[in-house]
Image: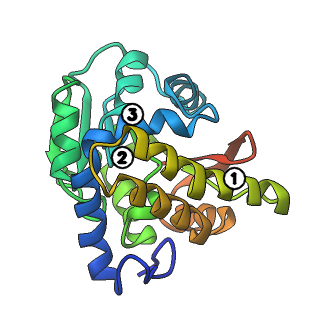
Amino acid sequence: MRAPHPVLDTYYDSEKSKRDFVREIFDQTAADYDRVDSLLAFGSGSRYRRQALLRAGLAPGMKVLDVAVGTGLLSRQIVRVIGNSEDVFGIDPSAGMLASSTSALAISFLRGRAEALPFAAASFDFLSLGFALRHVDDMAGVFREFRRVLKPGGRVLALEITRPEGRLTNALLRFYMRGVVPLMSRLVARHRNTPRLYRYYWDTIEACAPPEQVIATLASAGFGQVRRHVELGIFSEYLGLG
């Protein structure tokens, strides 16, 4: 098993308890997620997501699976690009997140994990994973599963926030993400654990596997033409062809 980052014992004490922690904190904070997401800024809103999908080759006529769909922020842009909701499927392990999605988005939703997708082989033309790679149990296993459910020639797009290379830029982003955003979230959050979610968010970014390891893991899973596109020095778009 290749976890995307080591155990973070401030939050949980094993890989198994990580799964429970992640599901529980997203369940608790789902009602706050879209509101606080807007505080992250740095171009990570709907326009950025749509542009990333277009850069990855999403087009009308494709059947799409959005893994870790969350509240549907990425799926809304998928529907906008392909022009219909019937061909879009969203899956997430968090019942709270799915409840928020289904109230605002007319796509097909399932509860499940990226490591065991409940779909037949070669089911989709395009698969997306939006800012959730850090939350999976096994990065290599997830990418193999992605490869399994994609049709030959299908595309995978994994969006992530990556630590900047410069020390000063990294320090500024850390201060913003781990200090300012949790503090600001207290002003708009309904659940007391929402600020903790965003401290955890940064800690997983800081500990996550470097881009070259993500690229190598995608290639090892059988994807071709694997590449990474970077926006603003921190937004990584990992693309591979099935």
Residue at point 25%, 26% (across, down)? 87
Residue type indicated by callout 1: Leu
**Label 2: few (<14), some (14–19) or many (≥20) C-alpha neighbours in 10 Å:** many
Determine whether 206 is above or below 12 in the image.
above
On screen, residue 78 versus residue 166, left or right, reads: left
Q: Nearer the viewer, residue 160 or 115?
A: 160
Residue type indicated by callout 3: Arg
Please tell me which of labels 3 and 2 falls first in the chain: 3
**Label 3: few (<14), some (14–19) or many (≥20) C-alpha neighbours in 10 Å:** few
What is the C-alpha distance between the residues marked 1 and 2?
Answer: 35 Å
Give the residue furthest to the bottom.
13
On screen, residue 111 versus residue 208, left or right, reads: left
Determine whether 107 is above or below 23 in the image.
above
**Camera sees residue 179:** yes
Counting from the top left corner in percent of width and height, residue 221 is at 48, 65
**Camera sees residue 129:** no
Counting from the top left corner in percent of width and height, residue 82 is at 38, 18
**Residue named by callout 3:** 35
Where disc 2 sits, the SS reads strand
In this rendering, which labeled residue sits more in front, label 1 or label 2? 1
Q: Which mark is residue 230?
A: none
Give the residue furthest to the front.
187
**Residue named by callout 1:** 173
Tag 1–tag 2 contact (CB < 8 Å) = no
Counting from the top left corner in percent of width and height, residue 129 is at 42, 47
What is the C-alpha distance between the residues marked 3 and 2?
Answer: 32 Å
What is the C-alpha distance between the residues marked 1 and 3?
Answer: 20 Å
Residue at point 57%, 28% (across, down)? 48
Q: Which mark is residue 150?
A: 2
